[in-house]
Amino acid sequence: MQTTFRRPPRLALITLLLAAASLHAAADPLAPTARWSAYTAGRAATPPMGWSSWNAFGTDIDEAKILGSAQRIADSGLSARGYRYINIDDGWAARRQMPDGRLVIRAERFPSSVQGGGTSFRPLTDKLHAMGLKAGIYSDLGRNTCSQAYSGVDTDLPKGSVLEREIGLYGHIDQDINLFFGDWGFDFIKVDGCGLRAYGANSAKVRSGQYRALTPVLDLESVSRSNIPAVQAEFTQINAALQRNKPDGDFLLSLCIWGAADVRAWGKNYGNLSRTSDDITPSWSRLLSNFDSAARRELYGHPGSWNDPDMLYIGKGDFDADHLVEAKSHFALWAMLNAPLMLGADLRTMPQPLMDIVGNADIIAVNQDPAGNQAVLAYDADDLEILVKPLASGQKAVAIFNRGLAPIDVDLTAEHLKLRGDAPVTLTDLWTKADSTFTKETKLRVMPRETRIFRANGERALAQGVYLSEQPGSVNPAVDGVVRPQVDPTIFRSSFGWTGTKGPGERPMYAGWGGARADSTPYGQVMQIAGTPYAAGIGILVNSRLEVRNQGYRRLSAQVGVDDSAQDRKHDVTFMIYGDGKLLAKSKPLRWGQPAQALSADVAGVRMVELVARSAAGTNEQLPVSWGNAALFSSER
Ligand code: GLA
């Protein structure tokens, strides 16, 4: 006879209720976690700097080309300025050896790799390490890479049977990560996504029998045709393999799915770098589009998890030695965005004026600033943008970017910089090193395609604290409320001729994207609650949770409410401030048109503040909310 253990019914019920409650809590993405959820594994406290083979050579790579650029980095002093990673991109693999599955290097291109009966990159990585440099390698999420999908000629492509030509990570994650980091000694891996995108059963190369079909889960043209959880699952496995094979954490993981599958919202949780756009080309218009793909993601990049608008193209086309203005803009803008500074030219022949641009120590320092704040757009119009990047020292870097073809006379104001208008502001030009001082506002001429870049020193508008939008590197939209991702607005209205560049600019007016923003609503407008505009603050959709690192401040306060731009005029939103998981302050239910409520909490000793905006009903994208003037203060009141 079977004995069954019976709990007293009351206890069983209580257990059941408790289990259901904890399940509910675990399932509630807005419940506070008291921790920072963006990626901090690996070695990317500041954006990585180095060189990659792709822009200069494509798949036509060899040892001499790679070592030649590495040597120039060492000899020129660029390595001492921070350029350390020497990354081998697509084109290194000869085949996957069968039956053991070990990857084989193109020995004719990498003669030092020949060892015994096989191949190894260890001699090459040893050489790079001996030069004080780090080494990077390339692979793909799928079975095959981008060049296998898109290259017109097969000269540089892997040879052999269909299985031997499967050189991507798919089905081999642990084996390959172990080979790259354990056996071969690499420090960096770029993981491309073409294998999950270009090998559908109907693709020409699959139909002709060259490659096996792999149902695409990534679609660059369409978020809704992408399977986001499936892509995330791949990166989760890669991370687990990195932990197993590189327990000392000395690695860098670079995600390369070009902004597809809405990765700009979640890449920050899966790797150190996440590409925000398709490949850069050496043309001005492409620079603009790659810049735009990251410029409004200031809250999605942090120490350990950076936005990546792709490598530098300084040295070619619109950024060659005949185009120093454009080359300087490219460098200054990438520095301001906290983009990785990955040189992409054949450095053996890079002219000195271009070496000087990428070696500018002041601009490198802006990029490598330990606070890790990506620049925030302080002025945003069709041809002109002003970007401000708060530095760890309390100073600000400011870049004034003329996208167009006519000179612009710019009014730069203390307000743009969140500095006091009644105290002097000193600007140091990071190209010429010249200092100038102004009070309240100054006029600057910015030539076509020029970016003027300065370090600004003045008295902070908020003397006793910091606006959260002045420390985007410490604010993480863990849940940004975006349920159905929409495309970014990239078309600008024209500038308004009457007021010069004072104020925030004539911004794009139609809806798009919806992600969290610094000093802006999720759709790019100036925040406003019941008619009161807020120049500073965080704009986000409802049903969102922001994680805010607190570095010793004692009070957090904000003016909270439903933004006037909300289409939903009837549902209530409640705002909550948590400190290390405990509720510290809660607003009354607020709806559209009601004045902002002042919400404030004592956060002394709290390490992780969380800001939650919740609504029981309504559609998130119709309910943008504003944490107006949200700031941390060092005093208790
Ligand atoms: C993709 C990536 C590029 C480069 C190539 C290699 O296009 O986006 O950066 O790695 O693949 O094939």
Image (cartoon, grey):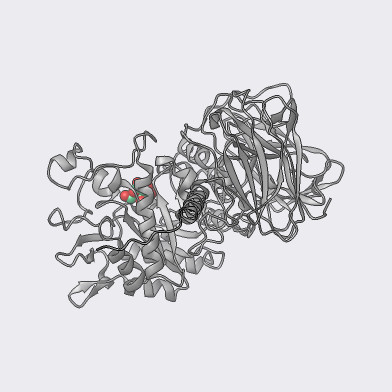
Q: Nearer the viewer, residue 410 or 377?
A: 377
Q: Determine the residue positioned at 55% across, 24% down.
A: 510
Residue at the front extreme of this rendering? 1
- Percent of width and height locating residue 303: 57, 57
Q: Determine the residue positioned at 73% across, 39% down.
A: 416
In the picture, measured across the screen, residue 430 lies left or right of residue 203, that is: right
Image vertical order of residue 114 relative to residue 280, above or below? below
Quarter occupied by residue 218:
top left
Quarter occupied by residue 413:
top right
- Percent of width and height locating residue 342: 47, 55
Q: Nearer the viewer, residue 235 or 348?
A: 235
Image vertical order of residue 619 relative to residue 466, above or below? above
Quarter occupied by residue 371:
bottom right
- Percent of width and height locating residue 375: 62, 46
Q: Nearer the viewer, residue 17 or 505?
A: 17
Image vertical order of residue 577 relative to residue 515, above or below? below
In the picture, measured across the screen, residue 63 lies left or right of residue 482, that is: left
Q: Quadrant of the N terminus?
A: bottom left
- Percent of width and height locating residue 361: 62, 59
Is residue 51 shown to the viewer in this render? yes
Residue at the right extreme of this rendering? 422
Q: Determine the residue positioned at 53% across, 27% down.
A: 491
Is residue 309 shown to the viewer in this render? no
Q: How many marks?
A: 0
